[in-house]
Image (cartoon, rainbow, N blue to C red):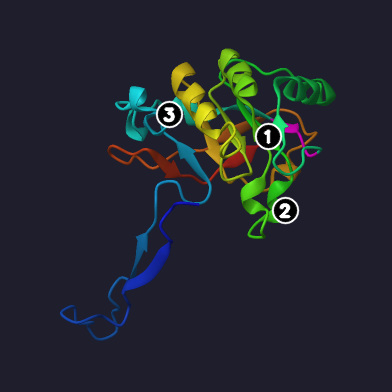
């Protein structure tokens, strides 16, 4: 929502392009041309995206330790369309999983919204964190949290405030994660979500991975 469309076109083929002749039996290296926003698909937000107060904290300035952490996945799949996830819901999900949120964790929030609603009319109406829940996570000094939805809060209700709280308390979040159902009930894992080192970047696409011992 609000992002330019993704474009992937062929910039150069093995057969050669005008001005770059292919030698007999040797192809020209093939190259595609990508155009996309920093906040396309599975991505992480830089703190500079959160608020003007964080203008200097662009993606290439954020320590790599924020993107290589221990992690847990909490089951919040009982939350429906447009429903706020409250701090009490997060605590109950921790209790159900027998897990505690530790300092510098990445906390992934499974709602099953991706499998139920990706690209249908309700894709934009997923559940999201309340202001209180975002602050509750931030005060636990996590590195980040991650959601399946295209925004961490609910648009027009809590989303702008959740972003601001992330900037205020110095933690970030991932959006548009998939396959979280594979993590539920399996305990702690190593989370890897390195961003591209974009100069002045307000965020970056990532390939998010959970690694179990």
**Which residues lie in the magenta part?**
73-77
Where residue 24 sits in the image (x, y, percent)? 25, 86
Q: Which residue is depicted at the point 50% across and 22% down?
A: 165
Q: Nearer the viewer, mark 3 or mark 1?
A: 1
The quarter holding residue 74 reads: top right
Tag 2 secondary structure: helix
Residue that numbered label 2 is attached to: 115
Taking depth in this image into account, of 28 and 147 the one nearest to the observer is 147
Q: Image check: 68 left or right of 24?
A: right
Q: Is residue 41 above or below residue 202?
A: below
Which residue occupies the extreme right position in the image?
Answer: 96
Dot 1 or dot 2: first in sequence order is: 1
For label 3, count other residues whose C-alpha is less than 10 Å away and answer few (under 14), some (14-19) or many (20+).
some
Q: Which mark is residue 64?
A: 3
Q: Mark number for residue 109?
A: 1
Residue 146 image offset from top left, x and y in percent:
60, 35
Residue drawn at point x = 61 percent, y = 31 percent? 190
Q: Earlier in the sequence, mark 3 or mark 2?
A: 3
Disc 1 residue crowd, few under 14, some 14–19, many 20+, Cα 10 Å: many
Query: Marks 1 and 2, how far apart in space?
Result: 14 Å
Coordinates of residue 109 in the picture (x, y in percent):
68, 34
- Sequence order check, earlier mark of 3 and 1: 3
Q: CA distance from mark 3 to mark 1?
A: 22 Å
Q: Secondary structure at mark 3?
A: helix
Horizontal side of 44 relative to 101 (left or right) equals left
């Amino acid at each position: 929502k609000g992002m330019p469309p993704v474009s992937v076109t062929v910039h150069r083929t093995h057969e050669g392009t005008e001005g770059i002749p292919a030698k007999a039996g040797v192809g020209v290296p093939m190259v595609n041309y990508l155009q996309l926003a920093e906040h396309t698909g599975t991505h992480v937000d830089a703190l500079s995206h959160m608020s003007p107060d964080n203008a200097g904290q662009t993606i290439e300035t954020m320590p790599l330790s924020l993107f290589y952490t221990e992690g847990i996945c909490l089951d919040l799949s009982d939350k429906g369309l447009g429903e706020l996830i409250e701090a009490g819901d997060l605590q109950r999900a921790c209790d159900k999983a027998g897990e505690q949120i530790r300092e510098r964790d990445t906390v992934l929030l499974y709602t099953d919204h991706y499998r139920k609603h990706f690209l249908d009319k309700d894709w934009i109406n997923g559940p999201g964190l309340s202001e209180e829940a975002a602050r509750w996570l931030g005060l636990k000094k996590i590195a980040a949290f991650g959601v399946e939805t295209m925004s961490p809060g609910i648009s027009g209700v809590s989303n702008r405030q959740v972003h601001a709280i992330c900037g205020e308390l110095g933690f970030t979040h991932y959006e548009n994660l998939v396959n979280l159902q594979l993590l539920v009930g399996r305990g702690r894992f190593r989370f890897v979500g390195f961003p591209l080192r974009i100069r002045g970047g307000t965020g970056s696409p990532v390939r998010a991975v959970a690694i179990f011992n």
